[in-house]
Image (cartoon, grey):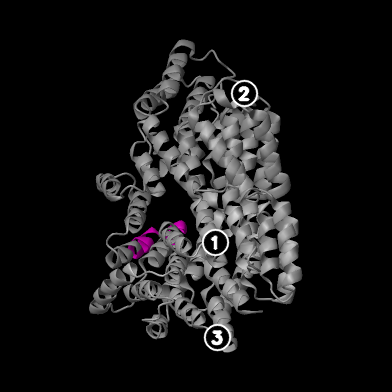
Amino acid sequence: MDEQDYKNIIIYYGREKLYRTMHRIVLEAMAKFTSDNSFRYYNGVALILEGVRLQEGIRELDHLQGDKEFGMAVILTLLFAHKRCSVVDKEELLSLDSRLKEERKKLSASSAYYSSLFLFLTGKYEKAREYVDKSQRMNPNNPEVMTLKAWCELNLNKNRSTFVLGLFSKALEHGKQLDADIGRVRYHQLNNDYETAITILNQLSVRYPDLNIPLVEKMKCHLSNWNWDSSIEIAMRILNLEPMNLEALLIKILILVVKDGNYTNSVSALQYLFRAMEKIEPTNGELFMRTGQVFSRICGRHNSILTETYQFVEKAYKLNPNNAEFITELGYQTAMQQKFKEASKLFKTASKIDDSSVHALCGLTLCQMSESGITEQVSQQIEFLTEIQGDEKIAILLMMSAKLHHADHDKAMKLLIEASEIQFKNLSTLSYGVEYLRQLNPDFLLELVKGLIKLSPTEHSSDFTSISSLHPSLTHSLNLLDSIVKACPGLVEAFYLQAKVQFRSSDVGNAAITLQKILHEIDPTYADAHLLIAQIHIQQKLYQRAAQSLEICLSHDFKVREYPMYHLLQGIVYKNQQRHEDALKCFFTAMNICGINSNGSISKKIYENTLSISDLLTLYLEVINTHVLMNQNTEAIKLMQLVSSEFSSTSEEGRLTIATADFYIQQGKNKDGSFLSNS
């Protein structure tokens, strides 16, 4: 490989944020091309971006100060490094800042290019484009400048037209440019022209037989086209050649989790990945953090997976204990495991290190809300965070605000929809893959769906007509779930919620199909799916089939007896088999699990975490109806009065009014009554 090849490979690994690998390639190039100072600059950049060898990077770049080829780029990089030192040299920062202003006045084409490249590698794409434009005006035919400009455009998503492709192609007219070819591949991926992208990569594999980059990109390209089989096949080919190739290991585990839902094998695979990262990228805190982040968001909060992802983020924290972002993510990892007190401490620590971190304060508020509900303190904190968040709205804050406005359904729904739009906003510049899933954050989207379901009406027409006729909360839920199940076809909770929304939309046929998919293809033991099938059978008055579903559910998982819904459904089946005493026992068991006192009043804290408010009302009404069928009218009237008090100011008030009127008008006449809603 010549100097240009090495430069392209160095930039590639810098863009992929594999900084130790980037540094290794730089050292190879420095040994081969001792007179090329650009590799010395890249050496400083790699050391600084890695984050833990800042002083080494600073010393390397100090030697290049005054070199006209790099000029402003060296000062920009030194400023970046000094700001991240554990002890900040304020005098040096002032000196560098002063010299930066001077360098701007005498900016050369080369200095502008290297400045743009550093800004690009640190994610400042707007600024990077500004300086690459200046470089191009001074040197319009430089292929490296054209390539970098095209990459800036591609990442900003301002221009995905043939203009970008033209820049890459024009750069290639001046000779081989691996980075321009990779840029063309990325352009075609984003435009869904996978055939052309694969053709380019095949050509690169022939041209660079000893380089695994074309094979890695081919693996990613197949994945971005949802071609799971080809992607895993290439991943295994790479791993046969290089057993600790991090990108191939990532894709292999990603497919295990999102497509197969194979969490058992994923645990040991994540442990191997952790060891590989410690060897290949031992000090890359950002890589450890991002890896832990992505797998925690796609595993359906599987405990064993969360244990492993915590290790990744903890490693990042240990590498840089003063990084507020790492500590904040460690807080979220802990909160996902329901360890709210421990998570609160981490969020407080992050806030002390960076008092402007709104994400850390959001995490702290989320913990308080999860532990104590919507208190006055939580309400004030959310209002305060909303005021200080700035122009860029934070999705998790919008979700918490929606809970604050739970009584105003339209307001709450608007906030949840806005939160979902933020999640999708940055995905347009990404192909499906690791980073796409990290930013999509299926775990958070499922929380939004659950919030929308709570806001949806429980009673609908008996027949599904069309999506356009549905309540907006259901329409948006279905749209979100379509995106989630496409991205994570092995995520069982997403399919269950999809079936639940379909059922609530009176689309019983598709709900049944979705549930069968869960039980036949993903997890035959999934209790909630069996319970929802039983609920569908009850709605259709197929009580014997409902009983069979409940029996199958119990045979798969005895813990289902801890689910109040199981006892509610079993009670309805017994009631319609005229086994009224058995029905009452089931209903009372469900009430007991829900934390309902002996006098019938509800413990609010428990009530939110067991049955939904709709299902709770169903439970009460079924008990009342059973009392009526047993001629226990005194008990029925007493309970109806209590229910009228408990649910009078809730989202179920309309349904309660109808049920109350029916009770007093037709008390004792409806021998086949059932109050079960589409919840």
Q: Amino acid at mark 1?
A: Met
Q: Is residue 357 above or below residue 378?
A: below
Disc 3 to disc 1, C-alpha distance: 25 Å
Return the residue nearer the eye: 192 or 568: 192
Query: Which residue position holds label 3?
Result: 30
Q: Amino acid at mark 3?
A: Met
> Which percent across, then down, holds residue 372?
33, 49
Of the residues under marks 3 and 1, which one precedes in the sequence? 3
Disc 3 to disc 2, C-alpha distance: 68 Å
Q: Residue at x 45, y 80 (%)?
A: 44
Return the residue nearer the eye: 230 or 583: 230
Magenta residues? Answer: 333-346
Q: Is residue 664 left or right of residue 189?
A: left
Q: Is residue 658 above or below residue 110?
A: above
Dot 3: within a 10 Å radius of its alpha carbon, few (fewer than 14), some, or many (20 or more) residues? Answer: some
Q: Are marks 3 and 1 in contact (CB under 8 Å)?
A: no
Q: Amino acid at mark 2?
A: Phe
Q: Is residue 301 left or right of residue 415?
A: right
In the rendered structure, does residue 342 fall within the stretch colored magenta? yes
Q: Residue at x 47, y 43 (%)?
A: 420
| Mark in front: 3 vs 2 | 3
Label 1: element kind: helix
Query: Which residue position holds label 2?
Result: 464
Q: Is residue 186 above or below residue 210?
A: above
Query: Which residue position holds label 1?
Result: 146
